[in-house]
Image: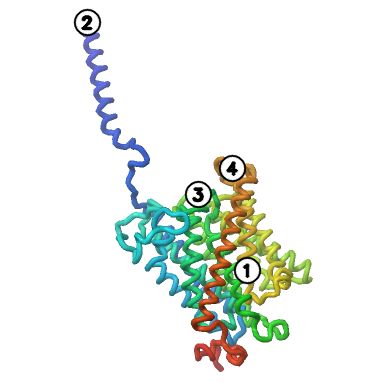
Amino acid sequence: MNKTLAAAAGLGLLCASTVALAQEAAPIVVAAEEIAPALDSGDTAWMLTSTVLVILMSIPGLALFYGGLARSKNMVSVLLQVLTVFSLITFLWVIYGFSLAFGGAGQIYGTFDYVFLKGITPDTMSSALSTIPEFVFVSFQAAFAAITVALVVGSLAERIKFSAVLVFAIIWFTFSYLPMAHMVWGGGILAEDGALDFAGGTVIHINAGIAGLVGAYVLGKRTGFGKEAFTPHNLTFTMIGACLLWVGWFGFNAGSAGAANGIAGLAFINTIVATSGGVLGWLLVESLVKGKPSLLGGASGAVAGLVGVTPAAGFVGPIGAIIIGALSGAICVWGVSGLKRMLNVDDSFDVFGIHGLAGILGAVLTGVFVFPSLGGVGVDDMTMAGQVWVQIKSVLVTMVLSGVVAFIAFMVAKATVGLRVTVDAEREGLDITSHGERAYNG
């Protein structure tokens, strides 16, 4: 009997201890929606690093890439246009850009709730990425916005007024970039439709490519185009710029995961292999068509591969990324030659032929290679044909919006400050006539 009582007492103590432990552990098990956003130092460090890498893409990466493609008498003008546009857009981003792109729900725009970054403090956690401070997310997206507008400079180079670039930049940023960013990444209508754009195929590359194409038509061809040689003055700078773009693009793509996680790793390796595929695809086609590979072709192929994989980076597997990159490089050889002649346009540094064309290809192929049967991460409740159609619709929306806004922006610039420098100024070079400087002295 005593043994029975002792056993019962022991069992009772065991049960009591178990209940007590369970009560202590209970607060750990809570619903996901009850967990307050908490700072993750690893995610924050990665996003800070990614932001710096994206800035590196613009200054000095894009500036050197474009500067090397220009004639020596226009080097300063190209560098200054990229630098000033980058600075202008980051300024506008803080004033109202972030708010209209990410400041609340809306079909086309956000709200004015965060103008001048109102209400954001060092302790405010990002509403989009819950493990990093809001200021970090604002900075990361500012770098995206700035490089997008700076890309358009490549279509307008060597004949546009500096003031016209700035007028265009303000209008196009406000009425094309911001709604695209919101519609795709800020919870707007394209996001609701299921459009996939991991790091900016539509928002950045197609958007900028179409704007550049419209600008090239509105401006007209450079004086002497088709009659004189318009060769790059420094391919070494162009190569350095392309390599800086590639390095910075790891922040562009892998940073778009928003955290230091497996998706960032997937985007990272895809950025390596797709770019390599772009180089090889371009050089192969160039060798077959022209009889020899070129450094300019290799650098351009790298950019084409980077552009092509941008919308797909976190959605497709490495094999899909290689295919997208190689096809982007191969088709853009035609984009800067045959297509350019068909369009009869002087797109100075082939912004549409590379960024526009590879962006369209990558956006559409994202809808193919996202599926697990082809190595992708998959999508819910969508067939491949259905997803491809969603991708095509997002491309068409981007093209129409960007084209219309760009045309209006250039017309406003023409009516207010004028678009082109004089023929004499263009022949002498924009470095001296617009800025009173030379890139090279002696």
Residue indicated by mark 2: 1
Residue indicated by mark 1: 352
Q: Nearer the viewer, mark 4 or mark 3?
A: 3
**What is the quadrant of residue 70 in the picture?**
bottom right
Amino acid beneath label 4: Met
Q: Are marks 4 and 3 in contact (CB under 8 Å)?
A: no
Vertical arrangement, residue 434 with respect to residue 357, above or below: below
Q: Residues within 10 Å of mark 1 (few under 14, many from 20)?
A: many
Q: Secondary structure at mark 1?
A: helix
Q: Position of residue 402 (x, y in %)?
A: 56, 66
Disc nearer the start of the sequence (4/2): 2
Q: Position of residue 36 (x, y in %)?
A: 32, 46
Q: Is residue 188 visible?
A: yes
Amino acid beneath label 1: Phe
Q: Residue at x 62, y 50 (%)?
A: 389
Q: Is residue 61 visible?
A: no
Q: Residues within 10 Å of mark 2 (few under 14, many from 20)?
A: few
- The residue most toward the bottom is 442
Vertical arrangement, residue 416 with respect to residue 62, above or below: below
> Which part of the image, by quadrant, shows the N terminus?
top left
Kindly report the distance in space between the C-alpha atoms of the residues bearing marks 4 and 3: 13 Å
Residue indicated by mark 4: 382
Disc nearer the start of the sequence (2/1): 2
**What is the quadrant of residue 142 in the picture?**
bottom left
Disc nearer the start of the sequence (4/3): 3
**Depth order, front residue of 98/244:** 98
Q: Secondary structure at mark 4?
A: loop
Kindly report the distance in space between the C-alpha atoms of the residues bearing marks 4 and 2: 69 Å
Q: Nearer the viewer, mark 2 or mark 1?
A: 1
Residue indicated by mark 3: 192
Amino acid beneath label 3: Glu
